[in-house]
Image (spheres, rainbow, N blue to C red):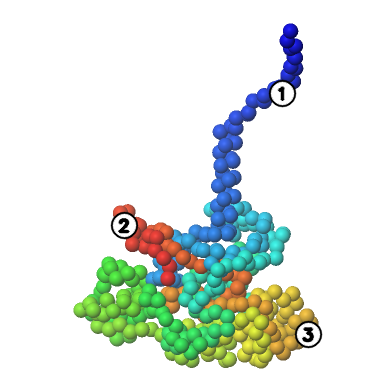
Amino acid sequence: MTDKTSTLESPKPPVKAIKKKSPFREWLDSVVFAVVAATLIRWLLFEPYTIPSGSMESSLLTDDFIFVSKFHYGTRTPKTILQVPLTHQKIWFTEIPSFLDWIQLPQFRLPGFTKPKNGDVIVFNYPGCPERPDEFGGYDKYPVDLRTNYIKRCIGIPGDAVEMREGQTYVNGKIFNNTPEMQMEYQVETNTTVNDKVFYKYGITEFAQALSPEGQTIYIVKTTPKGIADLKSLDFVKSANLIVQAKGDTSNANYNIFPYNSRLFPYNRDNFGPIIVPKKGVTIQLDEKNIAMYKGIITTFDGNNDAKYINGQIVLDGKPITSYTFKQNYYYMVGDNRHSSDDSRFWGFVPEDHIVGKAVLVWMSLDRNGSFLNRVRWGRLLSLIK
């Protein structure tokens, strides 16, 4: 006789039907994921930019689309956190601010694998200068991480002595190696009127016709050494000469050339310096010249809570000071289009906390003056920025 043991099975819980997401919910989830991913990539790794002007020609052209590396120098932690994602200062296609500055976090820089070097092409937030009149660009009053993006070539790093003589830059007494694409301004005399297509053929997009006092036909052009050599080879070009301001010529320089004091600094766009670029930890004596040169750093950019310029003195925490130690590094930036660039010659130094990243790649380039079939500059696609 076999015993049989009955087995009691516990009842299984009812299986809940998985509710299928609606098409709208799936679309919304995809959009949220894409925005979060794009925001993280832009913040931590790469950010796309478009070149809006000719200040870096012919190294970078108007309507070049570039990638800027954040991880070369180390990305900055967010400062203004109340902001519409993937915007900068304003909401797309409107004049509505895209942020609220109610909360401003302390800003730090994550470790990078290099430091900004002489010759790097760098994107940074435009600092401006507290003493610069608003009609010339003024001082950018946005939070640091939302100030207008500029792109220039780094000429001077912390501690460098930067100088320019007749348009040629010197760093620490040595000639700075100009990129072959650097542009200068030339006066070209011809024996006939020149068709615009001739200039375009040689990559010259900035030119204007004029008449000399003697009634001769002249053109003011901005071009590279190769471009001016090509023009000189044409049989209708009589002469081509570099246009530079003479040393000591301070015409209209008081509110134009930094530091806006032609008595102490008889500088112009082609002749200045040497100017010492501030370096973190370096102490300077505050004589008349140093106060004129560095007062904006002490009162505005170095993070001092109570620093003022009063009656020719720097007053810190209510007391006049006779020396000062810089709290962060600074850089000197100049555009490759030397005679058509708003840069450190006109507003001063770039604080390290304003540096966004290193420009590394042109991924697309469009010619707004080109025909439909020639709108894309194919030769510039995926080219490294040097």
Q: Of 295 and 132, which appears nearest the observer?
A: 295
- Mark sitting earlier along the chain (3/1): 1
Q: Residue at x 35, y 60 (%)?
A: 377
Q: Are marks 2 and 1 in contact (CB under 8 Å)?
A: no
Total numbered circles: 3
Q: Of 109 and 379, which appears nearest the observer?
A: 109
Disc marking residue 319: 3
Displayed quadrant of residue 243: bottom left
Amino acid type of the residue that numbered disc 3 sits on in the rendered structure:
Lys
Displayed quadrant of residue 7: top right
Q: Residue at x 57, y 37 (%)?
A: 26
Determine whether the residue tagged by mark 1 lies in a helix, strand or loop. Answer: loop
Q: Of 142 and 13, which appears nearest the observer?
A: 13
The residue indicated by pointer 2 is 374
From the image, state whether disc 2 or disc 1 is nearer to you.
1
Residue 316, given in percent of the width and then of the height, sits at: 75, 82
Determine whether the residue tagged by mark 2 lies in a helix, strand or loop. Answer: loop
